[in-house]
Every structure is written in C-alpha cells, then in structure tokens.
Image: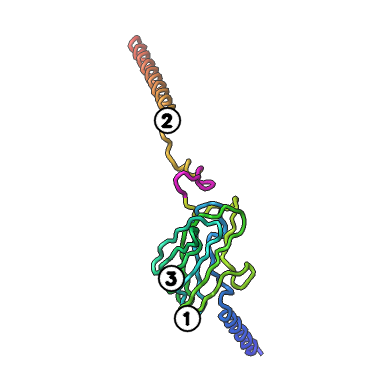
C-alpha cells in the first residue's frame, strides 16, 4: 500500500512538470520594469525577456505607447538595436542578437519620456525565436500572453528616473542631498565668525586680568 502511494505521488509530480513544460509563457512573461512611474518622467526601463521554449530567443520587438516623445536604447553586449520611427514619432525598439538559451533570460534597457497621462500604458512585445516562431505579448492583463505594462501615477515612487539639468529631483532627494552637502559660507557667516573671535578675546582678557590680580595679592602677602 505505501509503495502504491509513492508511485502515485511520482506520477502526479511528473504530470505537473510536464504541464509546466507544455505551457510556455504561463509562468514567466516578458515584462517591463519598473511597473509604476510618473507622467512625463524621463524613465530608465528594463525589459526582462525569459526563455521557456526549447529554442533560443534571438529578437525582441517593443512597441512604444502613444505619447512617448523621446527614447534612447542602451547598447547591450551581444545585441543590435534599432529605433523605428513612424513619421517623426518614435514607434518601436527592435533588438536582434543574443541568443538567449532555453532556461535563460536577457535584460534589455532603454530610456523613455513617459506620456503625459494617468493610467496604464502598454509596451506590446514580440519575442522571436531561432526556429522562426514568434510569441506575441500583446494581450490583456488576464490573458495567457499579457502585454508588459506600466501604471503612470503622480504618487508613484521614483525609481531609476534620469535627472536632467533644471529638472526637480525625485521626492525625498532634496532632503537627503541637503543633509549630505556641506554648508557653503554665505554673507552672514563672516559676521558670525567675527562675533566668535570677539568673545574669545574678551574671555582671554578676563583670564589674564584675573591672573595679574592673583599675582599682586601673592606679592602683597
């Protein structure tokens, strides 16, 4: 009887493993991080591309959401990247190279100016394989192949935001910077230093006067 239970458990475990292999994309999706950002921020994004198929990943096409007016792709070793425009607007980033072997993943990076809007924006992606097959990550959030998405909100915590000259620092950065930055002498600091010097001279004069008085009293005795 115990032996039969062990065999049943092994069969169940094997079925679970086979089910996981038979459903590529069910566990790991192509994602864009961070998942939350602020409108109009110049955001540094990471595209995480896992490979759960038996052939290598050799290409990724990422469609940019409407409202993205600026994008730069980071050069990643082993990959070529092309910025595709539709008229004067940037519409897509295309990476070719790798390859990403089965069981591995790639991390591709880019900078984009977020749309000036509140809500969910999608980065629809195509994952291309060496056998010519394509997995389309363009579906709804509840689908088997959901599109990567970012939620834009004014209350999002800034992560990997690129600061440019003249832009305000992320929330909390100003206070931290003020604590870490040494004070620079200003117009009023010279007056403070002079007041301190005057007080020191007065104390020294009082001490010298007291010493002279004590010396005279000693001689008188």
Separation of residues labelled 1 and 2 (CA atoms):
68 Å
Please state which of the two labelled residues, at mark 1 or mark 2, is closer to the viewer. Answer: 1
Q: Label for residue 77?
A: none
Residue 9 horizontal/vertical position (percent)? 62, 84
Q: Looking at the image, how many numbered discs can be counted on the residues? A: 3
Residue 116 shows up from this direction: yes
The residue carrying mark 2 is: 186
Q: Is residue 138 magenta?
A: no
Give x and y (percent) for residue 48.
50, 67
- Residue position for label 1: 131
User: Based on the displayed image, in which of its 4 quarters is residue 124 positioned?
Assistant: bottom right
Say what secondary structure mark 2 lies in: loop
Distance from Cα at disc 2 to Cα at disc 3: 55 Å
**Residue placed farthest to the left in the image?**
219
The vertical placement of 190 against 27, above or below, is: above
Counting from the top left corner in percent of width and height, residue 77 is at 39, 67
């Amino acid at each position: 009887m115990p032996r039969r239970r062990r065999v049943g458990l092994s069969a169940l475990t094997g079925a679970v493993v086979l089910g996981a292999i038979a459903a590529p994309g069910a566990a790991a999706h192509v994602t864009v991080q961070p998942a939350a950002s602020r409108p109009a921020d110049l955001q540094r994004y990471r595209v995480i591309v896992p490979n759960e198929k038996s052939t290598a990943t050799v290409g990724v096409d990422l469609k940019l959401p409407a409202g993205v007016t600026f994008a730069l792709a980071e050069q990643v070793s082993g990959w070529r990247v092309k910025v595709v425009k539709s008229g004067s607007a940037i519409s897509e980033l295309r990476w070719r190279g790798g390859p990403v072997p089965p069981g591995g993943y790639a991390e591709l990076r880019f900078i984009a100016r977020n749309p000036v809007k509140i809500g969910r924006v999608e980065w629809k992606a195509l994952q291309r394989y060496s056998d010519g097959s394509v997995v389309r990550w363009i579906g709804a959030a509840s689908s088997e192949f959901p599109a990567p998405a970012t939620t834009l909100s004014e209350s999002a915590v800034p992560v990997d935001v690129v600061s440019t000259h003249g832009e305000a620092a992320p929330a909390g950065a100003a206070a931290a910077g003020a604590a870490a930055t040494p004070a620079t002498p200003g117009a009023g600091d010279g007056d403070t230093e002079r007041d301190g010097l005057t007080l020191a001279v007065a104390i020294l004069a009082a001490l010298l006067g007291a010493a002279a008085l004590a010396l005279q009293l000693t001689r008188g005795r």
